[in-house]
Image (cartoon, helix red, strand yellow):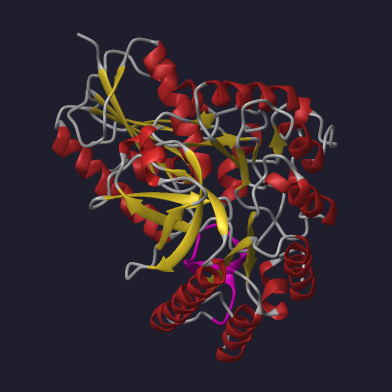
């Protein structure tokens, strides 16, 4: 009987890409991969520690695994496992905790999958996380997450990622192109580039701290890979998003008009306290440049509320800055104290009730922004990549500029791209559509 292994991923697209690569290693060694909701011999949880909620979710996921099989071997890997290995090892049911470098060698640390009396920890000093392991996620999606970079050299005062993932380092360009070709050969229509700080791509390539290639070199090379229909940039720092990159995306074969650009605060005072590497003026310039060359481009924004020292005036400064900016949606993070960060020791702690109130206000602004962006796209003819899930009788998909659409379920549409005309916004906030320049009957026959 083959052993069964199940995986659960907390956190970012980068974690998903690494989980998928680790899982393929288990399958190659004869394991059966099953869904996390099923009974398995081993459960692997890839952890996140960006927020306090991500920490708390870990215990819930462990209990879910124990419910699936009380005797299963449970391993924790990832960022939280690197930052607080002993804390995870003490959670009831956890048998193995692996840090930043050890997670890729997980099969070396397991024997017959018998339960341990105590959680076993293998975690290096983060300074030893100085080598690169490539990864990508495919198999359960119509798009793939392709890791091109890891780690970060920035010193943002709220962030633990450099402590969890180490220094900035990049995959060799040849390896990235090889992985992209592998993904394309498996029929995946869209690749999302991911990493911790992907605009820093090239640093640490071949173990050299200097840049062998730049991010612009990377996207120019990827744009020539055969069979890739869409390439999407996941998240890129505003100071690293150069005009040359914006202009190239605007005229490329495969890159889509969608950027996700972290802001974190619309107050220059707070940006300095956060040790961000730009001010709001630069951010405004980046948005204006994108919209000048790609008027239909979707722009997403990360923002933190409740950072130490954030007064009501600072928050309103952020709110008004975002309200007036030509952006499409927000990812709102409520600040939570992280051990071993500068911000954890700062004065001006914002009460949690006020943090939550401000977070709610910005989430409301995000709904307004997304609605306005969707409304601006009604009547446009765009391409949609349809996904694989039947959601209450509808199939959903995304346009190249990240408008989420729906149409009555048709399995023949799964993982196909079609030109459609956007017609209206439904009650659930998704956009309805009609197929462009082709009869629906013809589409159903495809």
Image quadrant occupied by the N terminus: top left
Up/down of 435 relative to 105, above or below: below
Side of 35 where 320 appears, left or right: right
Q: Residue at x 16, y 34 (%)?
A: 68
Up/down of 270 relative to 31, above or below: below
Task: Please tell me which residue lies in front, 167 or 83.
Answer: 167
Side of 80 where 160 appears, left or right: right
Task: Please tell me which residue lies in front, 83 or 246.
Answer: 246
Task: Please tell me which residue lies in front, 196 or 129.
Answer: 196
Up/down of 416 relative to 421, above or below: above
Quadrant in the picture for residue 274: bottom right
Side of 213 where 397 appears, left or right: left
Image quadrant occupied by the C terminus: top left
Number of numbered callouts drawn? 0
Q: Residue at x 56, y 53 (%)?
A: 382
Q: Residue at x 48, y 77 (%)?
A: 368
From this viewpoint, is residue 194 visible?
no
Quadrant in the picture for residue 292: bottom right
Instruction: Return the x and y of residue 423 as percentages of the image width and height.
Output: 45, 64
In magenta stretch: residue 255? no
Up/down of 296 relative to 209, above or below: below
Instruction: Return the x and y of residue 435 as percentages of the image width and height.
Output: 45, 50
Instruction: Return the x and y of residue 336 as percentages of the image width and height.
Output: 47, 66
Residue range of the region highlighted in magenta in the rendering:
328-348
Task: Please tell me which residue lies in front, 181 or 82.
Answer: 181
Q: Residue at x 65, y 60 (%)?
A: 297
Side of 335 where 203 appears, left or right: right
Instruction: Return the x and y of residue 153 as percentages of the image width and height.
Output: 72, 48
From this viewpoint, is residue 62 visible?
yes
């Amino acid at each position: 009987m083959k052993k069964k292994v199940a995986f659960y991923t907390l956190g970012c697209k980068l974690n998903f890409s690494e989980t998928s690569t680790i899982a393929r290693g288990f399958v190659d060694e004869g394991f059966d991969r099953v869904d996390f909701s099923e009974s398995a011999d081993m459960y692997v949880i890839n952890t996140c520690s960006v927020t306090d909620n991500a920490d708390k979710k870990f215990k819930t996921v462990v209990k879910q695994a124990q419910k699936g099989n009380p005797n299963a071997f449970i391993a924790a890997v990832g960022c939280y496992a690197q930052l607080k290995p002993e804390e995870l090892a003490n959670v009831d049911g956890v048998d193995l905790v692996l840090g930043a470098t050890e997670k890729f060698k997980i099969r070396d640390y397991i024997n017959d999958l018998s339960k341990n009396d105590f959680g076993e920890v293998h975690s290096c000093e983060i300074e030893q996380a100085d080598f690169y392991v490539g990864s990508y996620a495919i198999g359960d999606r119509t798009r793939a997450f392709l890791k091109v970079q890891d780690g970060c050299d920035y010193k943002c005062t709220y962030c633990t990622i450099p402590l969890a993932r180490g220094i900035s380092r990049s995959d060799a360009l040849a390896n990235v192109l090889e992985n992209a070709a592998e993904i394309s050969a498996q029929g995946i229509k869209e690749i999302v580039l991911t990493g911790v700080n992907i605009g820093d791509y090239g640093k640490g390539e071949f173990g050299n701290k200097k840049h062998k290639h730049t991010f612009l070199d990377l996207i120019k090379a990827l744009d020539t890979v055969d069979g890739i229909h869409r390439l999407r940039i996941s998240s890129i720092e505003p100071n690293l998003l150069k005009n040359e990159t914006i202009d190239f995306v605007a005229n490329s074969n495969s890159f889509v008009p969608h950027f996700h650009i972290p802001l974190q605060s619309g107050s220059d005072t707070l940006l300095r306290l956060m040790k961000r590497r730009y001010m709001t003026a630069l951010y405004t310039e980046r948005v204006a440049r994108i919209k000048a060359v790609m008027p239909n481009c979707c722009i997403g924004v990360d923002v933190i509320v409740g950072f130490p020292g954030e007064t009501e005036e600072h928050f309103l400064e952020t709110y008004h800055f975002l309200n007036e900016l030509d952006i499409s949606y927000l990812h709102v993070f409520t600040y939570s104290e992280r051990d071993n960060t500068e911000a954890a020791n700062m004065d001006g702690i914002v009460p949690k009730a006020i943090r939550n109130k401000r977070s709610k206000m910005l989430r409301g602004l995000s709904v307004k922004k997304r609605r306005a962006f969707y409304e601006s796209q009604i009547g446009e003819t765009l391409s949609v990549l349809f996904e694989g899930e039947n959601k209450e009788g509808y199939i959903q998909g995304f346009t190249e500029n990240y408008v989420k659409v729906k149409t009555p379920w048709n399995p023949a549409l799964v993982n196909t791209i079609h030109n459609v005309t956007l017609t209206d916004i439904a009650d659930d906030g998704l956009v309805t559509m009609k197929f462009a320049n082709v009869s629906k009957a013809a589409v159903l026959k495809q």
